[in-house]
Structures are given as C-alpha cells and as structure tokens.
Image (tube, helix red, strand yellow):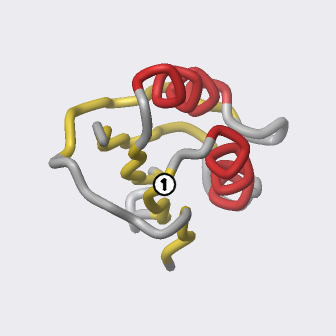
Amino acid sequence: MPCLHLLISGRVQGVWFRESMRQQALKLDVTGWVRNLADGRVEATVCGDDAALERMLEWARRGPPLARVTGVEQGEAPEMRFDGFEKKS
C-alpha cells in the first residue's frame, strides 16, 4: 500500500488538527500516524490507495476549520502496514 510523508506548516497546532486528521483518515480508510513537531509543524505518514491518498492530501492542504495551513511538504514514504490511524504525542 503506498504511503506519503507530510510536513504541514501554518497555524496547525492547538486547532484540533491531529484529531481532525485522524477522523478524516478513518473516513477514507487511510492508515498511519500524525504528530506535532517542536517547530510548530505537524508531521504525518498516511498510507492507502492512490485515490484515498489524494483526498487526504487535499484535506491536509485545508485542515480543520480553525487551522490556517500555509504549506504542505509531501514526499514518498516506504510502504508500511499500520493498524488504523494513530495520534502521536
């Protein structure tokens, strides 16, 4: 299953970004994880079919209503298997 590594910039911490991303991933049948970084960005690895990953990427560019996403760096990640979608601290 293909995976993407994402680094999301902007006002993305303290706005329910991780929980909202987890909920979106569950809707799209995407697995992986998401966490806050010390520099204020959010990091995620998302795995799923191509259509689901494209929709997840579109969502990450907007984020939840209180977020203000200013950038999404995207790269391929090694194919991995996850059980569900996890919020990491």
Residue 28 on image: x %, y %: 64, 38
Q: Nearer the viewer, residue 87 or 2?
A: 2
Q: Nearer the viewer, residue 40 or 77?
A: 77
Q: Residue drawn 40% across and 53% down?
A: 43
- Mark 1, Cα crowd under 10 Å, few <14 / some 14-19 / many 20+, is many
Residue 60 on image: x %, y %: 57, 33
Q: Is residue 34 left or right of residue 82?
A: right
Q: How many marks?
A: 1
Q: Is residue 73 left or right of residue 79?
A: right
Furthest residue to the right? 65
Q: Residue drawn 65% across and 56% down?
A: 22
Q: Quadrant of the N terminus?
A: top left
Q: Nearer the viewer, residue 68 or 26?
A: 26
Q: Which residue is mark 1?
A: 31
Q: Residue drawn 43% across and 31% down?
A: 49
Q: Is residue 84 left or right of residue 62?
A: left
Q: Is residue 29 left or right of residue 7?
A: right
Q: Residue drawn 42% across and 52% down?
A: 44
- The kind of secondary structure element at disc 1 is strand
86 vs 45: above or below: below
Residue 23 on image: x %, y %: 73, 53
